[in-house]
Image (cartoon, helix red, strand yellow):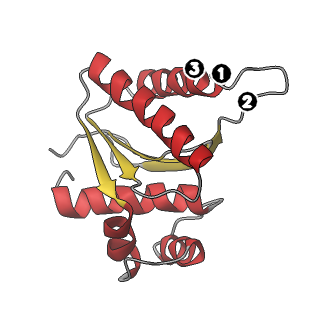
Amino acid sequence: MSNVTLLTLDLGTQTGWALLSADHTITSGSETFKPGRFEGGGMRFLRFKRWLTELKQSTDGLDAVYFEEVRRHAGVDAAHLYGGFLAQLTAWCEHHTIPYQGVPVGTIKKHATGKGNATKADMVRAMRARGFQPVDDNEADALALLLWALAQEGVA
């Protein structure tokens, strides 16, 4: 699969993303889905779904989506938010018949830094050492996940 388009995501109110285009260019960023002052909490999920659709349309489609699979959260709110983003993502992927896969956090960290318990700063440093300039740890995690997908899955 040499002309593949991949999207990797670090899900959350501040979602990190990385995209490998069919022409082998990598773009990435960090997108916020914090609800506005006069919005209900569900608006973040609607904006996330709309953002996914816009991203898909701008790329001529997606061949696969990988996301950071989080098993433990610092608090109940974080767990609920992650679950909401995960539900939106997996339903959206199913609707568009796009394969998706969760990758454990420790697996991504170990691949990027050699340590499964790397800190956020370690992840940012590791991505900078590879020539990327992530704006935050969310973008760094998405980039690390993309590099894992390329190495482990042999998609490029």
Residue type beneath disc 1: Met
- Taking 156 as reference, is 148 left or right? right
User: x and y percent of residue 106 in the render?
Assistant: 36, 69
CB of mark 3 within 8 Å of CB of mark 1? yes
Label 1 sits on a secondary structure element that is helix
Q: Residue at horizontal 56%, vertical 56%?
A: 138
Residue situated in front as seen by the camera: 82 or 9: 82
Inter-mark Cα distance, 2 to 1 = 6 Å
Q: Is residue 61 visible?
A: no
88 in relation to 103, above or below: above
Q: CA distance from mark 2 to mark 3?
A: 10 Å
Q: Residue furthest front?
A: 76
Identify the residue position indicated by label 2 in the image. 35
Q: Which residue is mark 3?
A: 46
Residue 52's x, y, as percent?
A: 48, 27
Task: Say which element carries label 3.
Answer: helix
Count of picture labels: 3
Going by the numbered disc 3, the residue's amino acid type is Leu
Residue placed under numbered mark 1 in the picture? 43
- How far apart, in angstroms, are the residues tagged by discs 3 and 1? 5 Å
Q: Using the image, determine if residue 68 lies above or below residue 57.
A: below
Q: Amino acid at mark 2?
A: Pro
Count residues near mark 3 (Cα–Cα under 10 Å), then give few for <14, some for 14-19, many for 20+.
Answer: some
